[in-house]
Image (cartoon, rainbow, N blue to C red):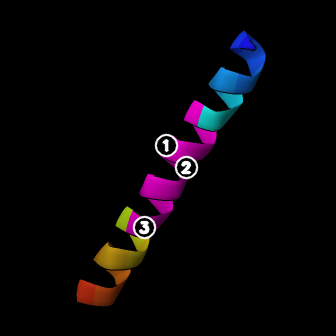
Amino acid sequence: ADASGDWAFHCHLLYHMDLGMFRVVRVG
């Protein structure tokens, strides 16, 4: 359960970082 939660949390962070990078590239 803990490992699954860590993976989901990590995926969530990567998802937001990807959106942030895309947003920066699009605006910049």
For disc 1, the marked residue is 13
Q: Quadrant of residue 16?
A: bottom left
Measuring 42% from the left and 67% from the top, which residue is drawn there? 19
Q: Main secondary structure of the magenta part?
A: helix
**Residue 28 visible in the snapshot:** no
> Which residue, as the protein is rendered here, is positioned at the far top?
2
Q: Check disc 1 and report its element: helix, strand or loop.
A: helix
Location of residue 9 (image quadrant): top right
Residue beneath label 2, please? 14
Confirm or deny contact between disc 2 and disc 3 (CB under 8 A).
Answer: no
Q: Residues within 10 Å of mark 2 (few under 14, many from 20)?
A: few
Amino acid bearing label 3: Leu
How many neighbours does mark 1 have within 10 angstroms: few (below 14), some (14-19), or many (20 or more)? few
Mark 3: give few (<14), some (14-19) or many (20+) Cα within 10 Å.
few
Residue pointed to by mark 3: 19
The disc labelled 1 sits on which kind of residue?
Answer: Leu
The quarter of the image holding the C terminus is bottom left
Tell me the residue at 33%/88% (across/down): 26
Q: Which range is magenta?
A: 9-19
Place of residue 11 in the rendered image (x, y in percent of width and height, measured from the top left): 62, 44
Please state if 9 lies on the left or on the right of 22 as rendered: right
Q: Is 27 above or below relative to 4?
A: below
Q: Which mark is residue 5?
A: none
Whichever of labels 2 and 3 marks the residue nearer the N terminus, that label is 2
Quadrant placement of the N terminus? top right
Compute the Cα span from label 1 to label 2.
4 Å
Q: Are marks 1 and 2 in contact (CB under 8 Å)?
A: yes
